[in-house]
Image (cartoon, grey):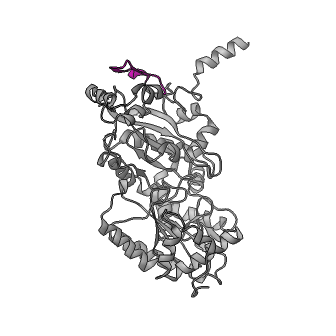
Amino acid sequence: MADAYPKTPMLDELEKGKWPSFVTEIKMAAADNPMGKDLLGLLERSYREKIGHWKHGGIVGVMGYGGGVIGRYNDLPDEYPNISHFHTMRINQPAGWFYTTEALRKICDIWEKHGSGLTNMHGSTGDIILLGTTTDELEPTFDELQKINFDIGGSGSDVRTPSCCCGQARCEWACYDTMGACYDFTMAYQDELHRPAFPYKFKFKFSGCPNDCVASIARSDMSIIGMWRDDIQMDKDAIKEYADGGMDIKADVVDNCPAKCMDWNGKELTIENSYCRHCMHCINVMPKALAPGKDRGATILLGAKAPIVEGALLSSVIIPFIKMEPPYQEIKDLTERIWDVWCEEGKNRERVGEFIQRVGLGNFLEAIEVEPIPEMVAHPRENPYVFYEEYFEEDDGSED
Amino acid sequence: MAKTVEEITEMMYKMISEAQGIKKLKPMDLTKAMKQLLGDEFDKKTCKLAIKNLIDTGRCVYTYFGGSFIELPHKEGAAND
């Protein structure tokens, strides 16, 4: 199997159509690397049998690190010896995924020398994913990557590699420097990133505005989403241009406002900013006319996760507005209080969101020394978590 | 008198050795055990350094089996040669 080029009728179907195909990419890699041939053979076999032949996790890693390498072995090593080991390495991506072509070439050269040459740019964590190498090649790969200033990312029960949108580098809506904050947190929590010490994974994601281009509200335990707290900036001449250009401002903007806080009288747009839910819809539709306010910072939300172990959760508001200024000490202090409570009381494989649901947000807030406030919403205008003790006392009295 | 990093390292190593093959211990299990054993002498930072010591010297390794654990180095059952 190792030497012959395998027949892959089922995989070949995935090369049809106009989209890029990972099968084509593996075939290209297979021309130079026997790992590619065995990978095609095993994948075709899995498709045919409807059985996965990979085992993941385990012991492999690089010296001193507890994350960033995901051990993979196949259960048919005699038939597919070149991918008997096929470990994945997660490499911490630069903030905002900006690279020089020189840096990318160096990464690819290292990986062609030490691994399969196959990459995933990027994984859902945000990392550069290097797919497939043997145990013996892990340390040499790591050494060479360090020489070009790349480090391994997170995996297991640690801080996962923080990721962010491109923020102020390319986007006018960014309410804070997402790339700066992401880099700062990555460096501040190197120990937590490389040495798993938590009940389960913990993810930071930094979005510059409520458009949330890195989907932090759905994918990160702590979502730090750009926010403004003053009025939406408005250019009346530009609004008129949109209207004169044929835009139906009432139908396309006003009627789609979830808070119904806008009005268009045919000539003038008015916004009742105190009702605005910061959904970004109006700003996205009329980017030349509207912009986030000038008093900018971030909203911090907590508890999102994908449906592993238990169901998916969206994060909910814990700090409605905070100024985002280095060194972000207030957020770091909050984070560390959250970790202390979660590490002390959390169960194995329990994410922060699940932990909050188990103990109740009221108890959790008390433990992390944050006062409950009405803005701690699960959804706009919905606040199912915060209870006030005096209400309970009144209830207790009336029942007696 | 508070325990040194080296003393805590040895206490943790003993725990891990005794649990090997019976129960997988997470770093937090070790820290909590030290808290219970040491009472007022407990210091979280020292425990963190002790764990770092165990890993950096190669006496123990991190493993992942649905979550991250600290174990003595051993050959993994599913590992291919």
Residue A321 in magenta stretch: no
Give the side of residue A103 with respect to residue A350, left or right.
left
| Image location of residue A220, percent across then percent down | 50, 47
**Does residue A76 appear in the picture of this structure?**
yes
| Image location of residue A327, percent across then percent down | 32, 44
> Who's the residue at 56% across and 27% down the image?
A383
Residue A263 in magenta stretch: yes
Question: Quick check: A254 above or below A302?
Answer: above
> Who's the residue at 31% across and 43% down the image?
A326
| Image location of residue A259, percent across then percent down | 47, 24
Task: Pick whichever, A90 or B19, lies toward us.
Answer: A90
- Total count of labels: 0
Question: Quick check: A238 above or below A49?
Answer: above
Q: Residue furthest bottom?
A: A3
Task: Pick whichever, A106 or A159, lies toward us.
Answer: A106
Q: Residue furthest right?
A: A400
| Image location of residue A294, percent across then percent down | 29, 31
**Does residue B75 appear in the picture of this structure?**
no
Task: Pick whichever, A44 or A245, lies toward us.
Answer: A245
Question: Quick check: B5 above or below A83?
Answer: above
Magenta-colored span = A258-275
Question: Quick check: A398 above or below A81?
Answer: above
Quadrant of the image containing the C terminus of chain B: bottom right
Displayed quadrant of residue A127 = bottom left
